[in-house]
Image (cartoon, rainbow, N blue to C red):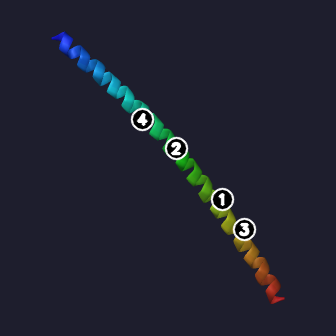
Amino acid sequence: MPKDIEPNSQNFEKKLDLLIKRYEEQKGIISSYIKREREWKKDKVLHRKEVKQLKKILKKYRNE
């Protein structure tokens, strides 16, 4: 009976290792995406602030 169990356990270990490697790979991809998304949002906020400031300056000069 141990002979039957051994190949199954080895097969299980290989499949488990594959799943763990895939998980780590996907985790890295998702982490990278989240980091880029956060940077993009930060830049977007900064650009909005700059646009608001420029609009105020334009409005000021138009009213003069």
Residue density around tag 4, few if under 14, some if 14–19, many if 20 or more, within 10 Å: few
The N terminus is located in which quarter? top left
Amino acid type for the residue under numbered disc 3: Glu
Residue 43, disc: 1
Amino acid type for the residue under numbered disc 2: Ser
Residue density around tag 1, few if under 14, some if 14–19, many if 20 or more, within 10 Å: few
Expressed as whole percent of the image width and height from the top left, the position of residue 31 reads 52, 44
Residue 50, disc: 3
State the residue position of label 4.
22
Helix, strand or loop under label 3: helix
* Residue pictured at 75% horizontal, 78% vertical: 56
Residue 31, disc: 2
User: Quick check: 40 above or below 33?
Assistant: below
* Residue pictured at 73% horizontal, 77% vertical: 55
Dot placed on the residue nearer the N-terminal end, 4 or 2: 4
Expressed as whole percent of the image width and height from the top left, the position of residue 34 reads 53, 49
Dot placed on the residue nearer the N-terminal end, 1 or 2: 2
Dot placed on the residue nearer the N-terminal end, 1 or 3: 1
Q: Are marks 4 and 1 in contact (CB under 8 Å)?
A: no
Expressed as whole percent of the image width and height from the top left, the position of residue 53 reads 74, 72
User: Quick check: 63 above or below 37?
Assistant: below
The C terminus is located in which quarter? bottom right
Q: Between label 3 and label 2, give the one nearer the viewer.
A: 2
Question: Which residue is outermost to the top?
Answer: 2
Residue density around tag 3, few if under 14, some if 14–19, many if 20 or more, within 10 Å: few
Q: Are marks 4 and 3 in contact (CB under 8 Å)?
A: no
